[in-house]
Amino acid sequence: MLVLGIEASCDETASAVVRDDGCVMSDVIHTQTSLHAPHGGVVPEVASRDHVRHVSRVVERALAEACVSLNDVDAIAVTTRPGLLGALLVGVEFAKALALATEKPLVGVDHLHGHLSASALFLPGTKGHAAPSFPHVALVASGGHTALYLVRGPHASQVEALGATRDDAAGECFDKVAKAIGLGYPGGPAIDRWAAKGDVSRCPLTFPRCRLGSFDFSFSGLKTRVAAHLEAHGLPQNEDELANLCAGVQAAIVRTLVSKTIAAAEASRVPAIAIGGGVAANRALRAELFREATERGLQCFLPEKFACTDNGAMIAWAGLQRLRAGEQDDLSLDASTTSILPSVTRKGSGRR
Ligand code: KG4
Ligand code: ZN
């Protein structure tokens, strides 16, 4: 079985063809980063218009690179939520038109469910991945979301919320700090690269976190801590100072993500952890989470790096889970700005 995935929830137009064992036959991404860069953030209307310009070409390339035609595909999966409404609608309407023209099944997918299911994906010619068994704890850490879930099964309705960020997402924190020190957008990959050359003991950063035992996160204190550091010391004056500051920032973010994720798995008495979202590409997070999980006898499932940041393959794969459960959508499929996954955290305050 082959599923065509289409993702257009924010600033990436992406499409992929995925086989039912998780093999990614093609993975095409058109990024709008340079289009939004002069504005210092994603401009929703600019994003929608760019999706309109590129979606058909991106899907055609995904089919061509998988060496299949639309006829060979068994179903079409598309991101319906959460994201920018105008951007989501471009993908949803395009997918509906394809489903109507080809009479193939159509399935809508929650973007966050795509991220938390991505660790099963692999590229042709590489070893297939064992997917985490159920139940397991999953951390989704991206530019817009940071949350911990108890995943009881492959379907979105089997996902329980354990906690989430009360303010900034982890990726947002990487991006805002990177902007403040002149590293540009997206900040995560740049901080990851600089941190690898730095010495965290030369710039240890502490910041207020959510109390122990809560699975909520708070990253706004770190942003303030970095602002205070820059006020006191000025911008890094040389490569060593920049690398040390990046190492300090990264270590602070990684420590809180790792400790809360391990604590959530232990409190939920599950044998495994999975991660997803752009921040899951971070080398220090991957290494530290894997090491600590293994030390505690927990299995740790890390998605391949191509599957961490926004992509169409994770959407095709999550869509496949819905198809396997006998579900599909009709042409009334609509987009929404909110996730279908539950939440127990209110932004800016505590637990509901
Ligand atoms: O999942 P994603 O592509 O988009 C959203 O759904 O938000 O995540 C993008 C985020 C950005 O904030 C980016 O800075 C961060 O993921 N990111 C990283 C790394 N690669 C991407 N953060 C830390 N280290 C990385 N290597
Ligand atoms: Zn994402």
Image (tube, rainbow, N blue to C red):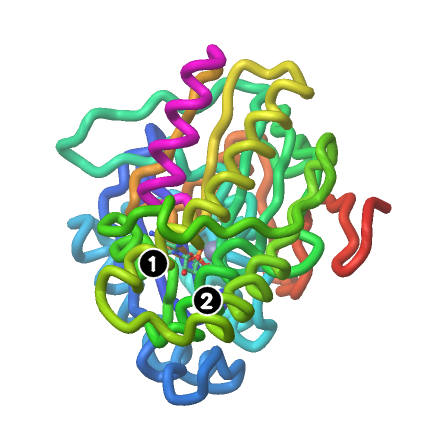
Going from N to C along the chain, the mark reached first, 2 or 1, is 2
Q: Is residue 293 magenta?
A: yes
Q: Is residue 313 above or below residue 13?
A: above
State the mark number for residue 191: 1
> Which residue position holds label 2?
177
Q: In the current view of this chain or complex, which residue is farthest to the front?
A: 232
* Residue at 51 percent of width and 57 percent of height: 79
Instruction: Report x, y in % for residue 1.
Output: 34, 34
Expressed as whole percent of the image width and height from the top left, the position of residue 194 reads: 27, 57
Q: Does the CB distance between marks 2 and 1 fall below 8 Å?
A: yes
* SS type, badge 2: helix
Q: Position of residue 285 (x, y in %)?
A: 40, 39
Residue 124 or residue 282, whichever sits in front? 282
Instruction: Give, as a three-letter code, the residue at label 1.
Output: Ile
Q: Is 126 rendered above or below residue 316?
A: above
State whether residue 312 is above or below residue 121. below
Q: Main secondary structure of the magenta part?
A: helix
Figure disc tally: 2
Rendered image quadrant of residue 347: bottom right
Mark 2 Cα shell of 10 Å, populated few (<14), some (14-19), many (≥20): many
Q: Looking at this view, is 164 or 224 the one in front?
A: 224
Asked whether mark 1 and ligand 1 are closer than 8 Å, the reply comes as yes
